[in-house]
Amino acid sequence: MFTGIVEATARVVKIDEEGTNKTFALQSNIANELKIDQSLSHNGVCLTVVEVKDDTYKVTAVDETLNKSNLGLLKIGDEVNLERSMSSGYRFDGHIVQGHVDQTGTCTRVQTLDGSWLFDFEYDHEATGNFTVEKGSICINGVSLTVFNCTKNSFRVTIIPYTFEHTNFKDINEGTVVNLEFDIIGKYIQRMFEMGYGEHLKERMQ
C-alpha cells in the first residue's frame, strides 16, 4: 500500500523489450536503498524491483500494465515519480493508494497563478464508470491530490511549488497523458450500490 506522497524521482536510462513486456532501467538517488523484490510505485504503478546496481535499478512492466498506464509511453530521459510502500507505524500523510492504476487521463489546461499552478484533466468516464467527488482524493502519477470543479469526466487540482519542483508535474503540459487511481473507498461504495446494497445501507442509516 502507498500514500501518494512522492519521495523521489527516477530518470529512465534504458528500455528493453522482452516479448510484450518492457524492462526499465532507472537512475535515482534512492536506488542504493532499494532491494530486489521490493514494491515501488512508478507514476502510481506498483512494480517489483528486479535488479539493483549502484545508482540504477530495473523493473519490468507487463503488457496489461503498459496498456492501462502511461508507462508504455515512457522514453529514455523521462522522469518518473517514486514512492516506496508504506511501512508499519509510518505517518499517513496522503490517502490510501494501492498502486493499481484505473485508467489514464489527459491534461487539458495548465494555469500559472501567483505561487501555484492549476491543472485540468479529462478522462473517459463512459468506458470505466470511474468518478470524482468535490474535495475528494485522487492519485495522479502517484501523487495524492484533492480534486475540485468536478464534472462527470473532468476535474481540477492545485499544485504547490514544492510538489511542482519535486515531481514530474513540472513536465505535464496540455495533452500530457497521466495515470489515475481513483479513491478506493469511493470505488467500494459504487460497487455496493451496483450490486443492490444501496437500499439496505439507506435503511441502516435511517
Image (cartoon, rainbow, N blue to C red):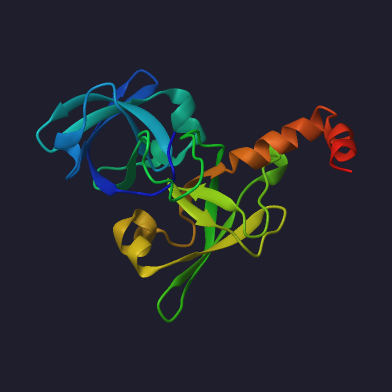
Residue 69 image offset from top left, x and y in percent: 47, 37
Compared to 155, does 78 lie above or below? above
Asked whether the viewer can see residue 95, the reply is yes
**Residue at x 58% of width, y 63% of height:** 156
As drawn, the residue found furthest toward the left would be: 54
Compared to 73, does 49 lie above or below? above
Is residue 79 rendered to the left or right of residue 45? left
- Looking at the rendering, which quadrant does residue 167 occupy? bottom left
**Residue at x 57% of width, y 51% of height:** 137
Q: Nearer the viewer, residue 131 or 70?
A: 131
Residue 74 image offset from top left, x and y in percent: 35, 41
Q: Nearer the viewer, residue 62 or 139?
A: 139
**Residue at x 69% of width, y 38% of height:** 127
Q: Nearer the viewer, residue 127 or 39?
A: 39
**Residue at x 81% of width, y 27% of height:** 195
- Looking at the rendering, which quadrant does residue 1 occupy? top left
Residue 121 image offset from top left, x and y in percent: 56, 57
Is residue 140 rendered to the left or right of residue 152? left
Compared to 116, does 55 lie above or below? above
